[in-house]
Image (cartoon, rainbow, N blue to C red):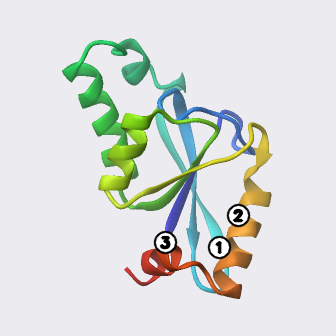
Amino acid sequence: MKVAFATTDGVHVNEHFGRAGKFAVYEFTKNDYTDVGFRVFGGYRDEAVESTRGQGALHEDAVNAKIKKLEDCGIIYVTSIGGPSAARLSRCGIMPVKVKDGVSIEESAKKLSETIRSGPPPWLMKMLVA
């Protein structure tokens, strides 16, 4: 299962889903995890999503394009996410997880890996076997 972390520096979860210009992506197995690189959406911020905010269908298309590029991820860690975007992710089978701004990606990955090894909750087990 792949997991994405919204980040500006590649080290911390420190960005809102819509604004995030970069996501660090990790691959998790039952016993371990590895860094598989970044998904980049423009520069420091995702201008396609930000510039269309409040523009109805244009904004929806920009958010949907972002989700399409992340659809192979089962979980996305963010500092914040709007209700409509969270619902879109959920409909695609992606679990948005809100964490405190500045949490280390490595710390979050270790905690998730420990949860997977020690007996994940049903929703996470379902993602692991899918």
Q: Residue at x 48, y 79 (%)?
A: 128
Secondary structure type for disc 3: loop
Residue type, mark 2 in image: Ala
Quarter residue 118 falls in: bottom right
Q: Residue at x 64, y 69 (%)?
A: 34
Residue type, mark 3 in image: Met
Residue type, mark 1 in image: Tyr
Q: Which mark identifies residue 33?
A: 1
Residue 65, above or below 69: above
N-terminal of the pair, mark 3 or mark 1, is 3
Image quadrant holding the C terminus, namely: bottom left
**Are discs 2 and 1 less than 8 Å apart at CB?**
yes
Secondary structure type for disc 2: helix
Q: Residue at x 52, y 31 (%)?
A: 21
Mark whose residue sits in front, 2 or 1: 2
Q: Which residue is mark 3?
A: 1
Picture coordinates of residue 59, whole percent (x, y): 29, 22
Crowd class of label 3 (few under 14; some 14 to 19; many from 20; radius 10 Å) = some
N-terminal of the pair, mark 2 or mark 1, is 1
Secondary structure type for disc 1: strand
Picture coordinates of residue 67, whole percent (x, y): 35, 44
Picture coordinates of residue 101, whole percent (x, y): 74, 37
N-terminal of the pair, mark 2 or mark 3, is 3
Q: Which residue is mark 2?
A: 109
Picture coordinates of residue 125, whole percent (x, y): 50, 81
**Are discs 2 and 3 less than 8 Å apart at CB?**
no
